[in-house]
């Protein structure tokens, strides 16, 4: 497990070998050390980027310019093209041919949009009042998205089959696409006026299969091997750390003892959790990014 908090990292490649570093424009940085290699992007993108994500095969990147425009390029920066003037929460389809994102709309109501990575066409498939990242199912047949605060919905990429699953945010799919894990609010003892956030495993009709009532748990990430779910919550000392649990809620264990993680998960200092999805370390290694620290911790 590797913390990338010493660098302002946007994403880690699917094989876990490279990270997208926004220093000096956009660079590829080896996660095991060594100098970063700058990605030469077209000047039309601007002087710096505000986000970047690897495609599922690691051969392309989606990146955002300072005004929120969405661009796609090959990993070496070539074939740069703009897909949208304004986009947030960009997510690649499993086959790397499309991206889903939220675009601004009239009267504060956003739009969930699917665009071809080639730039040939876009399709608005649903309204969305939340700007959380939509998440494609592993087979690419569904997109999970937060339609408004703490309301999780499913929709097919062509805009059909809309379903409301109920309360939840930060969805992560099981590898077989049959379940999602989300963080969702639940009443804390002794009464309903105080609310924690726990983890819930749902089927595709919103039926709750398991509820893990961990105090202020969030950012769940289902492993690509399907055997465990990583997430962040507070430890016995009140510090946010990474934990893992089996999908049925058993065998909870602490993964990190990082003194630089914030005491409050919702402070924004913990950015993301990523599993390695390709190569010999797929499902065995994960990365997390925190905003402030002095040195990366292995």
Image (cartoon, rainbow, N blue to C red):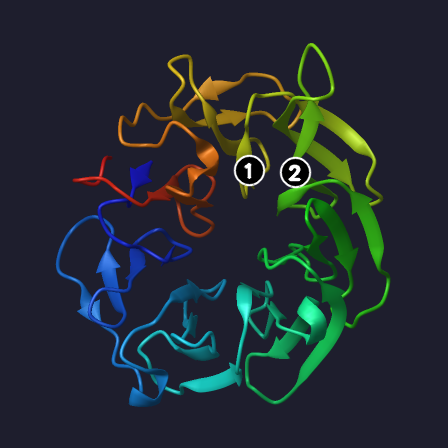
Determine the CA span between mark 2 and mark 1: 7 Å
Q: Residue at x 66, y 18 (%)?
A: 188
Question: Foreground residue, 297 or 237?
Answer: 237
**Secondary structure beneath disc 1?**
strand
Q: Residue at x 67, y 73 (%)?
A: 113
Quadrant housing the C terminus? top left
Provide the residue designation for mark 1. 220
Number of numbered tags placed on the structure image = 2
Q: Is residue 90 above or below residue 212?
A: below
Quadrant housing the N terminus? top left
* Residue 154 in the image, given as x and y percentages of width and height: 77, 55
Provide the residue designation for mark 2. 181
Question: Foreground residue, 178 or 46?
Answer: 46
Circle nearer the N terminus (2, 1): 2
Residue at the far left: name it: 35
Question: Foreground residue, 16 or 103?
Answer: 103
* Residue 203 in the image, given as x and y percentages of width and height: 79, 40
Q: Is residue 247 above or below residue 20?
A: above
Quarter of image, res 194: top right
* Residue 72 in the image, given as x and y percentages of width and height: 45, 78
């Amino acid at each position: 497990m590797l913390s990338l908090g010493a660098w302002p990292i946007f994403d880690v490649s699917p094989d876990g070998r490279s990270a997208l570093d926004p220093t000096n424009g956009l660079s590829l940085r080896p996660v095991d050390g060594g100098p970063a290699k700058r990605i030469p992007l077209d000047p039309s993108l601007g002087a710096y980027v505000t986000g970047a994500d690897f495609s599922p095969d690691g051969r392309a990147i989606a990146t955002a310019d300072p005004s929120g425009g969405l661009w796609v390029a090959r990993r070496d920066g070539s074939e740069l093209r703009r897909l949208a003037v304004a986009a947030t929460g960009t997510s690649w389809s499993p086959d790397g041919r499309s991206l889903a994102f939220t675009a601004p709309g009239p009267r504060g109501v956003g739009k969930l949009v699917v665009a071809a990575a080639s730039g040939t066409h876009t399709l608005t498939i649903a309204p969305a009042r939340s700007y959380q990242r939509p998440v494609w199912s592993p087979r690419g047949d569904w997109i999970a998205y937060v339609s408004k605060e703490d309301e999780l919905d499913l929709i097919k990429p062509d805009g059909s089959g809309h379903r409301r699953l109920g309360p939840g945010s930060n969805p992560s799919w099981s590898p077989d696409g049959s379940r999602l894990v989300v963080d969702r609010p639940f009443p804390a003892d002794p009464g309903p006026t105080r609310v924690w956030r726990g983890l819930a495993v749902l089927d595709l009709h919103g039926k709750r299969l398991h509820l893990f009532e961990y105090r202020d748990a969030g950012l769940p990430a289902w492993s690509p091997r399907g055997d465990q779910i990583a997430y962040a919550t507070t430890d016995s000392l009140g510090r946010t750390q990474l934990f893992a649990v089996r999908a049925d809620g058993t065998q909870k264990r602490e993964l990190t003892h990082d003194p630089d993680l914030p005491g409050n998960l919702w402070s924004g200092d913990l950015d993301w959790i990523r599993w390695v999805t390709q190569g010999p370390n797929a499902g065995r290694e994960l990365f997390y990014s925190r905003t402030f620290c002095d040195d990366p911790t292995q």
